Image (spheres, rainbow, N blue to C red):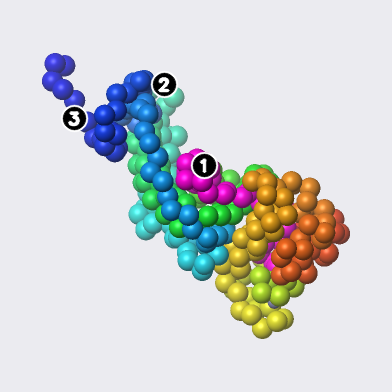
Amino acid sequence: MADPLDIVWSRPLPENASPSTVTVSQDAAGRWFVSLLCDDRIEQTPAVHAAIGIDAGLNSLLTLSTGEKVVNPKYERADRQALARAQRAMARKERGSANRAKARLKVARIHARITDRRRDLLHKLTTRLVRENQTIVIEDLTVRNMVTNHSLARAISDAAWRQLRTMLEYKAEWHGRNLVVVDRWFPSSKLCSTCGALAERMPLSVRSWMCRCGTTHDRDVNAARNILAEGLSVTACGGGVRPQRESSRSGQPTVKQENPRATKGIPVLQGGEDVKSATTQQ
Ligand SMILES: [Zn+2]
C-alpha cells in the first residue's frame, strides 16, 4: 500500500492553484475519485450574435435549429445492450450472494462507462454551443417525461438531457450567454416554422412532412426552429431568462408580436383540446 496510485487527471490543475478542498469518493463501479476545489479565472469568451434552438430526441440525441443533428454515438447501442444483458444476469443471481455482488459490479462498470462517455460528449458539445451562440433556447422536458414510456433508451436520453441542461446553465452563466428555457406546451413539432400553420396530426413515426405552404420539413429541425422562435419571442418581450409557463399554455397572442411566424399558429392553441393532443402526440 506504500506505492503511489496511478492517477488519471481529468484536466490539468490551474496554474498557481492551491486546492482549498479535497474530496475523496468511490463510485458504484469501485473507482476512486479525488476532487480538488480550486479558484480559477474563467477565460472570457468574445461576444457573438448567433442564437440557436435545440430539440431533444431519441433518434438523434439533439437537433439544432441550424439543421445540424447530433447523433447518438455508435458505441452507445452496444453499450446499452451490454447493460441490459448484465442487468438480466444480475437479476438471475440469488439475492445476497457473492455472485450477485459480482454481477452488480459488472452492471455498475458498464453504467459508468456509458455515463463517462456521455459526459465527455456533452461537455464538448455544450462548450461549443456556448462559445458559438449568445442565446441558446432549449425545452423544458419535465412535462413530457411524465407521459412517456420508461425504456432504457428513454431513461438514458432523459438523463443526458438533464445533464446537458445543467452544463448549459453554468457555462452560459460563466460566459455571459443567455439560456432560455421554453415549456413544452406549444406544439413545436406540428407548427410550420416557415408559415406558422399548424399540422393536424404528427405521430412520432413521421420524420419529415410537407406543409400546405410548400415547405418540406425535417421533423426535428422544424421543432428546433420553433423552439428558437419561441425563445426569442420570450426574451424580446420580457428579457426574462425563464418564460412564464402560463404565457404559452394560454397562448396569449399579445406577447408573441415580436415573432410573426410563431403568432399565426397560436390562436389554435386556445382550445384546451388542442393543447392536450399536442403534448401527447409529440
Ligand atoms: Zn408552412
Chain-order first, disc 1 or disc 2: 2
In this view, 54 is above or below 68: above
Q: Mark 1 touching mark 2, by CB under 8 A? A: no
- Which residue is under mark 3? 6
3D distance between C-alphas at marks 1 and 3:
35 Å
In this view, 212 is above or below 127: below
Closer to the camera in the image, 154 or 241: 241
| Part of the protein shown in magenta | 163-191
Please tell me the numbered disc located at residue 96: 2
In this view, 62 is above or below 216: above
Closer to the camera in the image, 25 or 182: 182
Task: Please give the name of the residue rendered at 57% of the width and 49% of the height, measured from the top-left corner.
Answer: 178
Closer to the camera in the image, 260 or 221: 260
Residue 1 point in image, percent of width and height: 16, 16
The quarter of the rendering in which ligand 1 is drawn is bottom right
Please tell me the numbered disc located at residue 173: 1
Chain-order first, disc 1 or disc 3: 3
Residue 265 point in image, percent of width and height: 77, 67
Left/right placement of residue 177 relative to residue 10 reads right
Residue 186 point in image, percent of width and height: 72, 58
Left/right placement of residue 240 relative to residue 137 reads right
Residue 249 point in image, percent of width and height: 78, 52
Q: Secondary structure at mark 2?
A: loop
